[in-house]
Image: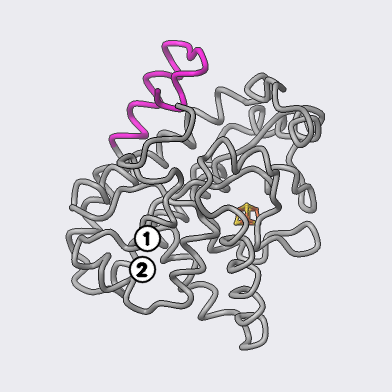
Amino acid sequence: MRPWETIMLSPALEKQRQQLYAQAVADMEQRVQAAGDFPAMLAALGWGLQELDRTYTATPARVKATVACRAGCSFCCSVPVDVQAHEVLFAAGFIRKNFPPAELAAAITRTAAHRARVSGLYSDERGRLRQPCALLRDDRCSIYEGRPEACRAHHTNNVAPCIADLTEPDVAIEQAYIPALRSRMFAVMLGLDEAIEAAGFDDRAYDFGSALHEALTNSLCQELWMRRKPAFPDSCLADPSMDDARPGA
Ligand code: SF4
């Protein structure tokens, strides 16, 4: 099920969603096709991530006025972040470029600890851990300009369900979503992903912290990705390999 299909959209919002999706696919395809090497791909990815931020900025003020999210509010950063390889490689590039050596070493240590904690767990099992993201520092994102797509697209209109969601697994957090905003953000996010997938790049879903640890410690990841191979080992997947029968399933 696509994320926007969990919420009812008016005909006008649905039309807008389709237009934003198609435009994001076309714009990103153009940039991906023009990029001949990894630095150029990073630049294309950076454009795509900023396009998500521009989409938020262009959202009508009356819609943005309903957003409860504020700087320093980090309850959603304890929910698992599932990503694709391009988001991990962009975040790793951001860290290498902006973190001093001691902070880079600390990030590697924290992502290693995260990876060890969630190794072998399915997505729902990781979710129940409510493990704060390894990049969260003092309730703020330490890679804000390099953060993944889902982190940019997530907003609610009420912090209470976000708080309750940390301890009560059955909280209907969807009720706090803002259809007029979420449909726009997810349209662009999925359009960017579609363009990258259509160009043959790795489209597997990874656990962000685990894959980021691999990216920060293994320079081969970006080479594999550029060759349209899986960038990260199966141990970093959001869910263990589909070839492995889930115990008790
Ligand atoms: S990358 Fe940043 S915004 Fe996303 S979960 Fe981690 S700390 Fe939060």
Secondary structure under badge 2?
A: helix
> Neighbour class for label 1 at 10 Å: few (<14), some, many (≥20)?
many
Give the magenta part as a residue range: 1-22
Given the current orientation, which residue lies at the most extreme bottom position? 101
Q: Does the residue labelled 1 lie within 8 Å of ligand 1?
A: no
Quadrant into which the N terminus falls: top left
Asked if the stretch drawn in magenta spans residue 17, the answer is: yes
Q: Give how far across and how far down residue 241 sits, in percent.
A: 36, 45
| In the image, residue 64 above or below residue 54 | above
Of the residues shown, which amino acid type is indicated by label 1? Leu
Which quarter of the figure has residue 67?
top right
| Direction from residue 183 to residue 166 in the image, left or right | right
| In the image, residue 227 above or below residue 7 | below
Asked if the stretch drawn in magenta spans residue 247, the answer is: no
| In the image, residue 42 above or below residue 101 | above
Q: Residue 10 carries which label?
A: none
Question: Are the two marked residues, 1 and 2, in contact with CB atoms closer than 8 angstroms?
Answer: yes
Which residue does the numbered mark 2 point to in the structure image? 42
